Amino acid sequence: MKIESIINITENPFWISETLPYFFDGYAKDEIEIHVMYLILPFILTKSIREGILLSANSSSTFDSLFYAPSNKRKKVENNVFETFNESLMNKTSLVVIEEKYHSYKELMNKVLLIAYRKNYYSLKRGKISPIKRFDYSKTKNSEDFLFDYFKCSRNLGIVFKDESLSNLYRKCQISRI
């Protein structure tokens, strides 16, 4: 399969729109500022963040606990030799790509939001999204669907974002212009 085909599949707004109700489920609020929505794609479409950070998040995870809390862990290198590494330093480094991807995914997110709106997943009033559909993550847990990791990450991202203000999210993601 050509690299262009893989990019076309992973950046398809129709299947990405299916992740939004899982984000709504994790976010668990009646209103979401529309600018928060533009932060979803840089996180769930960046493999290192999706697989290395968001998949391991849980219901008590916060932005700070995932990206800033000091955590020295031991990693097996070889022949039972262990090396200590600072996981939070790796996670902070992952945030460096967010600003660039935020700007490059804006157009794609516009399409995703339009498709999700037409699917009646949310309503829009005065710059705020009101979720209409929330997909229950527990019913998807045993799914063999290749999208399962994306659904889980989207829900976990909602959990992580729910206690942050919009200005804090943008500051922590180092996004200086909208």
Image: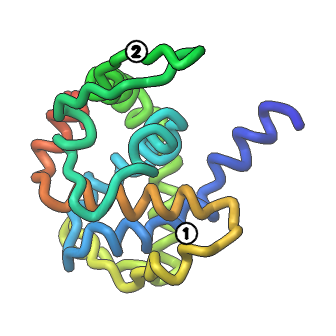
Amino acid type at image mark 2: Glu
Q: Position of residue 124 (x, y in %)?
A: 30, 74
Hey, which quadrant is residue 64 in on the image? top left
Query: Mark number for residue 18?
Result: 1
- Decide which of tag 1 and tag 2 comes sooner along the chain: 1
Farthest residue, direction right: 1
Query: Crowding near pointer 1: few (<14 within 10 Å), some, many (20+)?
Result: many
Q: Position of residue 95 (x, y in %)?
A: 32, 29
Picture quarter with the C terminus: top left
Whether residue 14 sits left or right of residue 102 in the image: it is right
Mark 1, secondary structure of its residue: loop
Amino acid type at image mark 1: Glu
Whether residue 3 sits left or right of residue 97 in the image: it is right
Query: Mark number for residue 39?
Result: none
* Distance CA(mark 1)–CA(mark 2): 40 Å
Whether residue 177 can be seen here: no
Q: Which residue corresponds to the image point at 32% horizontal and 28% vertical from the top-left?
A: 73
- Circle 2 is placed at which residue position? 83
Q: Position of residue 99 (x, y in %)?
A: 34, 29
Residue 75 or 163: which is nearer the viewer?
A: 75
Whether residue 155 sits left or right of residue 47 in the image: it is left
Farthest residue, direction front: 80
Q: Is 112 above or below relative to 119?
A: above
Whether residue 87 sits left or right of residue 148 in the image: it is left
